[in-house]
Image (spheres, rainbow, N blue to C red):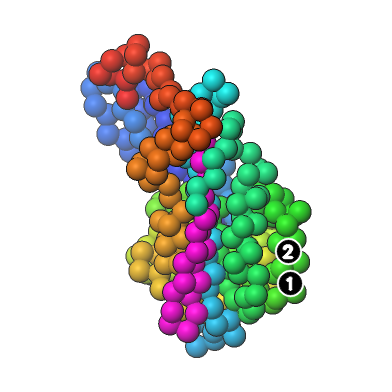
């Protein structure tokens, strides 16, 4: 099965007039949705069977957020925070660290450190589904010194990363799967562990990656457990949504961090000058 991604381009009016199926607005150029050559291939597609659930009994979700506080004489100033949500036996436990101040740009080492702090709180978890937000390949590379892969295999955990950016409402699916939860193989992805899923009818499509690599039927079983244990009211794992909310650094916390930097370390953090606003005034956006 071939699925085409959609993109927007500016089409000259003269080209539109040559298309019999196009509606032309005289004297103007209009934006239309067109298909491009870039596309991905879907392999086997199966429905998520709720009668075949896995033996996983808990859900763990981890997320890390960053925010730019401002700029100082030492360069940019950022803050980073992580949070962990554990759902087990009908209870929800949340752990989050206090924001960590970083002088300079956020690097993989800072993200790796914060992820390590979160993993310490779940080191004893066994037979669980671990959820991460983002790209699994990048996360595994960053976390290799932390032994993330070893933690997963030794504790019989399965890692599922969810990419929110992969939401495409224009993908056409077979009628059998268009209105039901399903999982489908992505044949030409960056890794053999990429899948297209819909966790609830009528919700957006998501891309997931699974580690370690397992059969499609087992992934369906894992997703059935995820839906039953966690809930996916908006088509997105609830535990991962909560982890994102608790990892966010609020504006009032940004003000507090600025005060801490100035009073304890003598570092004054200023608001970065936005040249677009200065040059364009009210038309900057």
Residue 83: give its label: none
Q: Position of residue 159 (x, y in %)?
A: 62, 66
Q: Dot 1, crowdedness within 10 Å: few (<14), some or many (≥20)?
A: some
Residue at 46% from the left image edge and 54% from the top image edge: 247
Magenta part of the chain:
78-97
Q: Quadrant of residue 37?
A: top right
Left of 55 or right of it: where is 86?
Answer: left
Q: Position of residue 24 (x, y in %)?
A: 27, 29
Q: Which residue is mark 2?
A: 149
The answer to whether residue 163 of the structure is visible from this angle is no
Q: Quadrant of residue 155?
A: bottom right
Evaluate if marks 2 and 1 touch, with contact meaning CB atoms under 8 Å apart. Answer: yes
Q: Residue 153's mark?
A: 1
Q: Main secondary structure of the magenta part?
A: strand
What is the spatial separation of the Cα atoms under label 2 and label 1, in whole angstroms? 6 Å
Tag 2, which secondary structure? helix
């Amino acid at each position: 099965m071939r699925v085409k991604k959609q993109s927007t381009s500016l089409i000259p009016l003269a080209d539109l007039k040559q298309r019999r199926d196009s509606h032309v607005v005289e004297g103007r150029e209009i934006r239309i949705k067109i298909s491009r050559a870039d596309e991905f291939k879907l392999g086997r597609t199966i429905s998520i069977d709720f009668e075949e659930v896995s033996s996983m009994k808990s859900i763990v979700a981890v997320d890390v957020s960053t925010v730019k506080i401002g700029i100082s004489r030492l360069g940019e100033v950022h803050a980073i925070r992580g949070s962990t949500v554990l759902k087990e036996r009908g209870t929800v436990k949340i752990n989050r660290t206090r924001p960590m101040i970083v002088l300079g740009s956020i690097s993989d080492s800072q993200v790796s450190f914060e992820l390590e702090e979160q993993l310490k709180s779940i080191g004893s978890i066994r037979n669980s589904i671990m959820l991460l937000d983002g790209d699994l390949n990048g996360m595994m590379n960053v976390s290799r010194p932390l032994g993330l892969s070893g933690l997963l295999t030794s504790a019989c955990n399965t890692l599922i990363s969810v990419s929110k950016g992969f939401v495409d409402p224009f993908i056409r699916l077979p009628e059998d799967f268009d209105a039901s939860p399903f999982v489908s193989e992505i044949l030409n992805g960056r890794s053999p562990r990429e899948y297209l899923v819909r966790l609830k009818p009528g919700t957006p499509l998501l891309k997931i990656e699974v580690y370690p690599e397992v059969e499609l039927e087992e992934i369906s079983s894992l997703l059935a457990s995820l839906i039953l244990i966690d809930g996916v009211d908006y088509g997105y794992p609830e535990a991962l949504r909560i982890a994102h909310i608790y990892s966010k650094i609020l504006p009032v916390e940004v003000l507090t961090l600025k005060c801490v930097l100035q009073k304890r370390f003598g570092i004054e953090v200023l608001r970065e000058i936005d040249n677009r606003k200065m040059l364009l005034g009210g038309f900057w956006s």
